[in-house]
Amino acid sequence: MKVVIFGSTGTIGKHLIEQSLEKGHQVLAFCRHAEKLNIFSNPNLKIKEGDVFNMDDVASAVKNQDAVIIALGSGKSRKSIVRSQGTKNIIAAMENHGVNRLICQSTLGTYESNENLNFFWKYIMFGWYLKQIFLDHELQERYVKDSDLDWTIVRPGAFIDGEKTELYRHGFGAKAKSLKLKISRADVADFVLKQIGDPRYLHKTPGVSY
C-alpha cells in the first residue's frame, strides 16, 4: 500500500516510517528537512521535502496515495498552529485528488475524552501550560470530522520511550478507569498503522493508553 506520512521526522513519525516499511508499505515521508531521515535506507521509502503550509507541496505528496497519516508536531513552540492548518491543507489536497483514507494522530483529552484525564493533565498541562497546543489539536480534529473523508482520529496518552508491546488499551469510553495516561511512541505507531486496513474505528476517535 502507498502511504504518505506527514510529520515524518517527529518522534512518532520515525516509528511510523520504520513500522510501515516492515509491513511492506511504499512510504512517502513528507518533511521540511530530509537530512533528518538519513537513518533510513530502504527502496520502499521516498522522502519529499516540503511545507504543510504550502498547498502545492502538500498536493504533490498526497496525489496517488492509498492512505494518509498525519502525525504533525509543534516542535518547541507552544503557540504553533501547524497541526490545524497543516491538516486543513492536507484534507483539501485529499479531497481534490480523490484520496480517502486518513488517520490523524491527535491527543487524549480532546472533547469528550477530557474526562479520561487526571487533575494534572486536565488543569495544569492542557488547561494552562500547553493550552494553545491543546486548542490547536481540537481545531485539527474539527477539520477532520467536518471532512467527507474516511477518517480515524487516534488519541494517545502521553508519549514515553519503550518498545512496541501491542499491550495497550484502545477504544475505551470517557468514563474508563485505571488508565495510565501514557503509551510508548512505538505502540502509538503500531495502533495508527493498524487502522489503515481496519474499518473498526472508521469515523471514530479511539483513545489509546496503557
Image (spheres, helix red, strand yellow):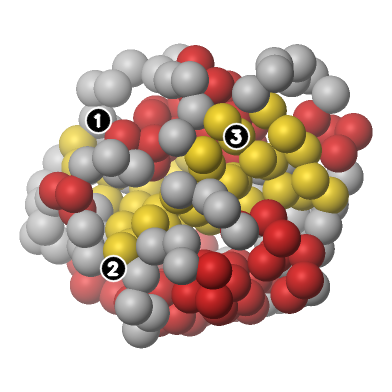
Q: Could you tell me which quadrant the N terminus lies in? A: top left
Which residue, given by chain and number where applicable, does mark 1 sit on?
168
The amino acid beneath tag 3 is Val
Do callouts 3 and 2 mark residues in contact (Cβ within 8 Å)? Answer: no
Q: Is residue 112 above or below residue 142?
A: above
The amino acid beneath tag 2 is Asn
* Mark number, residue 114: 2
Give the residue displayed 60% in from the left and 34% down from the top.
27
Q: Position of residue 78 (x, y in %)?
A: 70, 68
Give the residue displayed 90% in from the left and 33% down from the top.
35
Residue 70 visible to the viewer: yes
Q: Position of residue 147 (x, y in %)?
A: 38, 79
Location of residue 9 by image quarter? top right
Nearest the camera: 121 or 138?
A: 138
Which residue, given by chain and number where applicable, does mark 3 sit on?
27
**Nearest-to-viewer mark from 1 and 2:** 1
